[in-house]
Amino acid sequence: MSTATALAHPNIALIKYWGKRDVPRNLPAVPSLSLTLSGFQTTTTVVWGARADELLLNDRAGSDTETRKVMDLLDRLDPARPPCQVISRNNFPTGAGLASSASAFAALAVAASEARGGPPLTRRDLSALARQGSGSACRSLWGGFAVWRVGTRDDGSDSVGEPLAPAEHWDVVMVIGVVSTATKAVGSTEGMERSRHTSPLYPTWVAQASDDLEEGIAAVRDRDLDRLGRAMEASTFKMHAVMQTSHPPLLYWQPGTVAALHAVWALRADGVSAWVTMDAGPQVKVLCAASDASQVAQALQPHVVDVHTLRPGGAARRIE
Ligand code: DP6
């Protein structure tokens, strides 16, 4: 029996991933760019060699589906593995559009490979492993800004998270307005497939994605917040247009979401460089300079149940 504990942070996409070219391997139809955030984290312990497979998630037994997804990742790492116990905790809401699956599978990949022992996996291999649990998790293997390209290989070995710039590169923050902590009605995996099969906008979304990515990368390299903000909002609203034109429509926003984004735009009209993004949930995430964070938090406050200001964070790592 051996044990390892790892910590990983969620990441929020600045240029979005929505759609797969290969569902079982979680290979994306579009490339994406993300920012890993400190403050929110998943801590996961893997006991390699237990009496039976078991998942404890936030101090309760994992559901059958959750347990299956976790054990599938361990099977991919080692098809001849012993039964394992996995104990995972998030210090933020799970399954509510706050990227908990990204930090969860990144922490699991690191903890499992360390608990197993043997020759260490490269970051790329860990990223590929995490990706098969949840696509966006492959970006949380890196701190700061990370890119995930579509790749061309069928086995997905060239579609992993890659570092663009470390957390120290740029003094920006994400101010997260939590509109609701309810678990989302339609998960990302199901939602993406629905969009691929039914949204008339999906082909355009895929066709424009490489240009959107390059715009985002250039803006990060130049530390140009207005340019990055414009690219991020454009990618966000294009993705939500694809979601909303799926059948049946995927509307992840709540009234508070719309109120919060108008509040941010009003602030921007007053000269604050603050930019919104939303994922598969109602939360509003605002990218801005660290020095503008408290003003942004104040603008969000009346429309949300909670506000968190998160700085860029580090890579997934072993802690015990
Ligand atoms: C809207 O990575 O959760 O947050 O690969 O099916 O597990 P699966 O999906 P997931 O999707 C994230 C979608 C998004 C945008 C993004 O993070 O890029």
Image (spheres, rainbow, N blue to C red):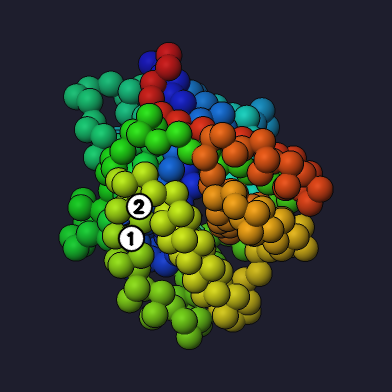
Residue 78 — which label? none
Which residue is depicted at the point 54% across and 68% down? Answer: 237
Q: Is residue 22 above or below residue 172?
A: below
Which residue is depicted at the point 22% across and 25% down? Answer: 120
Q: Is residue 152 above or below residue 310?
A: below
* Image side of residue 124 versus residue 252, left or right: left
* Image side of residue 257 versus residue 84, left or right: right
Q: Is residue 131 above or below residue 195?
A: above
Q: Could you say where residue 143 lies in the image, as x and y percent from the top left?
A: 38, 34
Placement of the N terminus among the 4 image quadrants: top left
Amino acid on which the number 1 mark rests in the picture: Glu
| Mark 2 burial class by Cα count in 10 Å: few <14, some 14-19, many 20+ | some
Q: Residue furthest front?
A: 271
Which residue is depicted at the point 52% across and 75% down? Answer: 242
Foreground residue among 13 and 89: 13
Q: Mark yes or no: residue 212 visible.
A: yes
Foreground residue among 312 and 47: 312
Q: Residue furthest bottom?
A: 200
Amino acid on which the number 2 mark rests in the picture: Ala
Write down the residue under mark 2.
219
Q: Could you say where residue 74 lies in the image, as x and y percent from the top left?
A: 38, 37
Write down the residue under mark 1.
215
Q: Secondary structure at mark 2?
A: helix
The image quarter in which residue 262 lies: bottom right
Foreground residue among 312 and 148: 312
Is disc 2 in contact with disc 1, using a CB cutoff of under 8 Å?
yes
Q: Could you say where residue 270 lies in the image, as x and y percent from the top left?
A: 65, 54
Which residue is depicted at the point 66% across and 36% down? Answer: 294
